[in-house]
Image (tube, grey):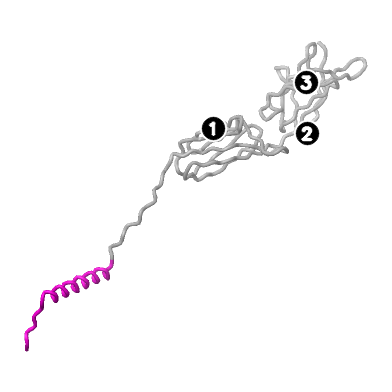
Amino acid sequence: MPSVTFGGNAIRVLSILFSLATLSSACDSPTAPTTPLRPVTSSGPYTLSGVVSEMTADGSVPLANALVTDTSTAQVSRTDANGFYRITQLAAASHAITTTRAGYVTETRRVDLSGDTQLDIRLDRIASHTLSGVVFEITDGGQVPIEGVEIYCDSCGSPDGHTFVYTDANGSYSLAWTFDGVHPLYVTKAGYGIVDPTDQFGRIAATVKGDTRFDIRLARR
């Protein structure tokens, strides 16, 4: 059998073919699995803010002095004149937010925080009534209305209470935003006193159930 010899060029060709075969084998083998990149997350702290308002006949109106509380941390923010509140340093979690104001229905919402969040809150007024009547005295000519009598109610009037009203020329007064129940009234005018006051402070108690008329009799001292 004749012997086979390879020249330099043949050796180089064989070397190239061997390299290509090795590369092809490496490409066909399974690759090692890679670990996916995890998204970067943050646990806070975050800020919750917004505006507390009520809906009126004239549109949405901001509410000052409402208390917005995160019940999980007991942090409280009081709304400013524009109804704005702000609670800071909150963790990424579910938070129960309670909003209260005198004369309004308490509102509680749950908020899942994953970043700084704006939460606007609308409150509804508690159903209220009007307490009204006439302040008068009895004279020889009969019942006579008294003008300029001061009536003070601590628990009725505007949503915060502490309301003063004065009788007009017909002796009439009216206290709006009054709730069902008993309301002690201070009734004062120089030279007069309440007939049969109901407590030691010289007040007279008006019982309200719905819109209520409550007339008050004074007597000259």
Residue at 81 percent across and 17 percent down: it is 218
| In this rendering, the label closer to the viewer, 3 or 2 | 3
Residue 101 screen position, x and y as percent: 62, 33
The disc at residue 211 is 2
> In which quadrant is the C terminus drawn?
top right
Residue 131 is left or right of residue 70, and the answer is: right
Residue 85 is left or right of residue 3, and the answer is: right
Of the pair 219 and 26, the residue shown nearer to us: 26
Residue at 18 percent across and 73 percent down: it is 18
Type of amino acid under label 1: Ser
The residue carrying pointer 1 sits among few (fewer than 14), some (14 to 19) or many (20 or more) residues within 10 Å by Cα, namely some
Name the residue carrying label 3.
166
Q: Residue furthest bottom?
A: 1
Name the residue carrying label 1.
77
| Magenta-drawn stretch contains 142 | no
The answer for how far apart the CA atoms under marks 3 and 2 are is 19 Å
What are the residue bounds of the magenta stretch?
A: 1-30
Of the pair 132 and 35, the residue shown nearer to us: 35
